[in-house]
Amino acid sequence: MSITLLLRCHDMDKTAEFYRSVLDFRVTVAAGTLTVEKHGGRIVFTDRDLWNVPLTCSGTMYFTVPDIEAYYSRLEDKNIVVWPIQEMSYGATEFGVVDCNGYTLAFQQLV
């Protein structure tokens, strides 16, 4: 089973550029939405306020990547890392970043 999140963003162009150039996601725009994908994980963004609440998310979105060390090396100097790469007790190596909208993303490689 896969899951796709629909999230509100501040600015579609800024969000597309961040996910494309900083995180190296595949980015597509269609019908007023922005879809970002990496290694089977997907988020869809809209700049419309469909929920009538401030832009917020109380969780962390996890993406599994095949080479965590290489991906971390790409991002560690971009001033977006919220926790550094580390081995976790549950059998994963991971790190976290914050995106241009304030959402927390984690990237992991299972051991």
Image (cartoon, rainbow, N blue to C red):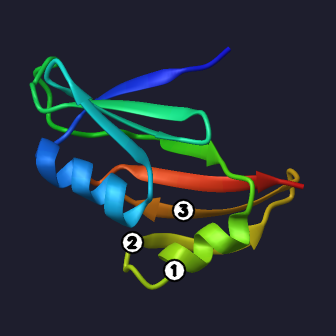
The residue type indicated by label 2 comes to Ile
Point 41% across, 33% down: residue: 43
Q: Earlier in the sequence, mark 3 or mark 1?
A: 1
Point 44% across, 58% down: residue: 24
- Badge 1 is on which residue? 76
Point 35% across, 49% down: residue: 103
Q: Nearer the viewer, residue 77 or 96?
A: 77
Point 54% across, 62% down: residue: 96
Q: Left or right? Give the position of 53 relative to 76.
A: left
Report crowding for label 2: few under 14, some 14 to 19, many 20 or more residues within 10 A (C-alpha). some
Residue 44 image offset from top left, x and y in percent:
33, 29
Residue 87 in the image: above or below residue 64? below
Q: Given this view, does label 3 or label 1 mark the residue nearer the observer?
A: 1
**Label placed on residue 96:** 3
Which quadrant of the figure has residue 98? bottom left
Q: Secondary structure at mark 2?
A: loop
- Badge 2 is on which residue? 80
What quarter of the picture does the C terminus occupy?
A: bottom right
